[in-house]
Image (spheres, helix red, strand yellow):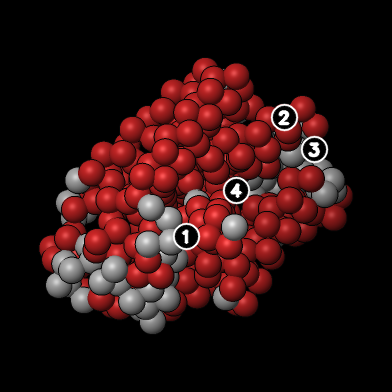
Amino acid sequence: MANETKTIIGIIKACRPVHAIKNASIFAALIFSGLLFEKGLFMRAVEGFFIFSLAASATYLLNDVFDADRDKQHPIKKYRPIASGVVSKQLALWTALVLGIASLYWASLLSDLFFILLAFYLAMQVLYSLFLKNLHVIDILIIATGFVIRVYSGAVIIDAHLSVWFLLCVISIALFLASGKRRAELGILGSTGETRKSLVKYQPELLNAYVTMFGNAAWMSWALFTFFESPQAKVPLWIFLAELSQSIAVNKLLMITIPVTIFGIMRYQSLIFRGKSEAPERLLLTDTALVASVILWIFLVIWILYGGIATAPVI
């Protein structure tokens, strides 16, 4: 009985429930389309969140099975349930298969386009686990693509339009997070390739350049999005301020969030170079400054879009 309980707990850990925070990006389209409080659409997004969480857990199990031998050489990953032997590879594979099929079936009931995106995500992750993770640059692009698929899944679930500027934001942030993850791994493990073959091809200077480039692209693309896609103000005070100064435009309310965005990126960048961004989902839950900036950013966005000071959705 004790062994069975240990195995069940191990399976749950191997599914990485803490990583579900990544799937919260499915709600982005709902929030920015001004439909957050539409109960029917909100529940569809919630369904999408759980569906994607099942699919992602399936890919984590599969990846851990293929990486078990290398994970044993990793200072942290060696404690994972599959690498440590708490969960057998066979059980992990069967669980991954069940979760993958269940997520696809559920997705087919929710939206045909969502089903296609999810199927593409699962296929991409299988290829990633098999060999794409060993190809430098390609591995970063695959990780980033996963974030983009999450955001677009949220859009197709509620049939919302995403602007080109918003897409640019998503891509830039995804590449920033992915390159930061690799930079932290390189800082911890070095480029020996003992735990990840692709690290052999990366040099610190190259990943530093990626992190800097995509960090700049992330905040700049968000700044452009807020400049071109912000909702129009309707509260007299905002209109009055806009009349006082040409720098406070009526249709640029979201630009208030730019300083918070820059601080968040600067904070995350500092954590990258301290080797703490290998697991970004944990940082988003544990680093006080980063958590505070994310909460403030979300508060400002929702206040602007739903607090009665704006008149229209932005995507």
Mark 1 to mark 2: distance in Å? 29 Å
Determine contact: label 2, label 3, CB under 8 Å: no
Q: Which residue is mark 4?
A: 24
Question: Could you tell whether 210 is left or right of 45 in the image?
Answer: left
Q: Where residue 46 appears, x then y in whole percent? A: 68, 38
Image quadrant holding the C terminus, namely top right
Give the amino acid at mark 3: Phe
Mark 2 to mark 3: distance in Å? 8 Å
- Dot 3: what SS? loop
Residue at position x 17%, y 60% in the image: 197
Question: Could you tell whether 127 is left or right of 218 in the image?
Answer: left
Q: Which residue is mark 3?
A: 37
Classify 306 as above or below 241: above
Residue at position x 28%, y 56% in the image: 67
Image quadrant holding the N terminus, namely bottom right
- Dot 1: what SS? helix
Can I make out residue 127 in this image? Answer: yes
Q: Which residue is mark 2?
A: 41
Q: Quadrant of residue 217?
A: bottom left
Q: In the orientation shown, which residue stands out farthest toward the bottom?
A: 274
Residue at position x 84%, y 46% in the image: 308
Badge 2 density bin: few <14, some 14–19, many ≥20, Cα 10 Å = some
Q: Nearer the viewer, residue 275 or 227?
A: 275
